[in-house]
Amino acid sequence: MVLTACTSTRVHKVKREIQIELENEQLSNQFTGLLLVDSETKDTIIAKNSNKYFIPASTAKLFTFYTANKLLGKKLPSLKYFESTDSLYIQGTGDPSWFHPYFKDSTVLSFLRNTTKPIVLYLNNFEDEKFRPGWAWEDYQYYFSPELGPMPLYGNVVTIQEKSKLNVSPNDFIRYIKRGKPDKLRELYKNEFTIPQVLKDTLQIPFITSNELTKSLLQQKLKKEIFLSKKPHNKTYEVLHGIATDSIYKRMLYESDNFLAEQMMLVASSTLSDTLSFDIAKDYVLEKYLSDLKQEPRWVDGSGLSRYNLFTPESMVSLLHKLYSELDRQRLFTILPAWDSNGTIKSLNSTTNHFIFAKSGSMGNTYNLCGYLKTKTGKTFIFSFMNNHFRIPSKEVRIQIEKTLKLIYDAY
């Protein structure tokens, strides 16, 4: 009885300390939401504005991860194809790994190189725009905002490095690159690039995609002719599987890769329809698996890049609880990055006690963290800590988040 009373007093004290932290002057001019629940009992430990809508930023990628994990298997659907007596008909699934600068999978390349039949390529199965609603138009030149499409090649970016000489991938773009003092890295409507006179770091600049360019780049890579088709083949396609989906998920969440997140929603839609569309995957998952969310999200992209997105801490925690219940725990805590006040931890140190495993999301005046907290005694809590409309440096917000969650870690 004495031990129970002491524990109850300690917990009550911690809850009071957290309430004080959430009401301090530093946070008074921002909008803060926090929900933290016990993963086993589902008891609410602390709640503040948990049913209010926030701009999620990249924490929206948790919904993308959930969607892809529900609709895809262990290997990524890379290509749909039909082989007739005289031709190989192919169409994309949205797989982002084709010749990607990070992934080294050669499944599709080997498959297409090994065919002796003419390749007929259909690229009109993509229904969406190349950019999602609410994206900032001026971001077109930056690595985090490539165009989307049915068969992206090289991550839809030109990768430029300089050591003893200038290395460009895909190499065909080298003739469109000039040196200067760029006020923009690429022309708005042209694949013409300007890089600094001295290039110290690797540059990745999105290029403007088109069916003809995709055909050309694919021909150069395969060293064989490709034929474009305006109409799909009316036969049932087979599916060629490529890279492990977990390798995509991990990079998507650790690097907060917007391009991978958007394309994975398209790949997910390819399992439901011959048409690639974010809305097809989103609507299916919301209706079939997430209809029990108390506050329906306004979910407009897979990456969280759009400020049109609106999610509540309660919806985030509900989703995280589904992941916690449905996935193997070791797999979940491998895919989801560890975190501290410096941000995502990309290389785990076995001598450091990491107790927060979560996805962060940041953009101007916004910083959110949603995930799992493992306490001193081994309990696991699920939380969503969302902060919008602040004017202080985001580093101060991260410190506040860690300080608050550390109180829970020590108390339980």
Image: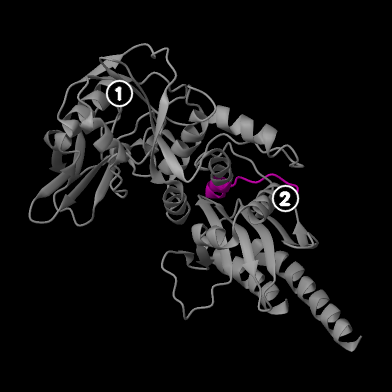
Q: State left or right for residue 394 relative to residue 377.
A: left
Residue placed at 68% from the left, 67% from the top? 380
Residue placed at 73% from the left, 76% from the top? 412
Residue placed at 29% from the left, 48% from the top? 104
Q: What stretch is highlighted in magenta?
A: 50-62
For disc 2, the marked residue is 314
Quadrant of the rendered image containing residue 118? top left
Q: State left or right for residue 342 relative to residue 190.
A: right
N-terminal of the pair, mark 1 or mark 2, is 1
Q: Where is residue 160 in the image (x, y as percent from the top left)?
A: 20, 46
User: Is 323 part of what is drawn in magenta?
Assistant: no
User: Is 51 part of what is drawn in magenta?
Assistant: yes
Disc 2 marks which amino acid?
Answer: Glu
Q: Is residue 50 visible?
A: yes
- Residue closest to the far front: 85
For disc 1, the marked residue is 210
Disc 1 marks which amino acid?
Answer: Ser
Task: Establish if 391 lies above or below 339.
Answer: above
